[in-house]
Amino acid sequence: MSDQLTLTPRQRDDLRTIAAMIIPPSEEYRVPGADDDIIQADIIATLGRDTKQVVTALDHLARLAGMPLADLEPAARDGVAQQFRISGGVAAATLVRVVLQCYYRDDRVLRSLGLELRAPFPKGHVLPDGDWSLLDPVKARGGSLRRTS
């Protein structure tokens, strides 16, 4: 599909910059930051339906900075990030979600958290029993769960 939206080199640089601000590397836990090459490649490769919102967020960041965020002095980036949190809306939330989901599926990060490197299904994960009575109002509705309005 030739009309598919992609990130420009400037947007990729800004994505790397803001990702490092969201999750910096940690020597203590021996994990990379979200600006790591492997994590960045995963973000770019899996943007899919979130591309438009991420592009909107990155362009908003650049407008707030008055230049590409990556070109801004590190000390000034925090102020831009604060403004972005306030004014970024859905696009900012989407950008943060995309960074977090790719970061927390990286093998190195999972290993540092003591998690097994595997897909959650079909083996599944054991969850503690909860209060099943919370479903009683749903069961009492009966019939179809489809909304009519």
Image (cartoon, rainbow, N blue to C red):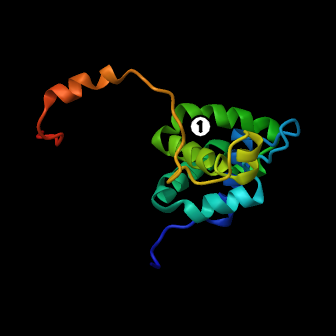
Q: Nearer the viewer, residue 66 or 59?
A: 59
Residue 86 vs residue 103: left or right? Answer: left
Give whichever of 102, 135 is nearer the camera. 135
| Side of 147 where 127 appears, left or right | right
Q: Nearer the viewer, residue 135 or 52?
A: 135
Visible in this render: residue 60?
no
Rendered-image quadrant of the C terminus: top left
Residue shown at 67% from the left, 48% from the top: 103
Residue placed farthest to the right in the image? 27
- Which element is circle 1 on? helix
**What's the residue type where badge 1 is placed?**
Phe
Residue 126 image point, x, y percent: 53, 37
Residue 3 position by quadrant: bottom left
Residue drawn at 55 percent across, 31 percent down: 86
In this orientation, does residue 58 appear?
yes
Image point 83% across, 38% down: which residue?
29
Q: Is residue 29 left or right of residue 101?
A: right
User: In which quadrant will I find the N terminus?
Assistant: bottom left
In x, y percent, where is residue 44? Answer: 61, 62
Which quarter of the picture shows residue 64?
top right
Q: Position of residue 123 (x, y in %)?
A: 53, 50
x, y (%) of residue 100?
A: 62, 44
Above or below — where is 111 with respect to 81? Answer: below
Which residue is denoted by mark 1 in the rendering?
84
Closest to the observer: 86 or 102? 102
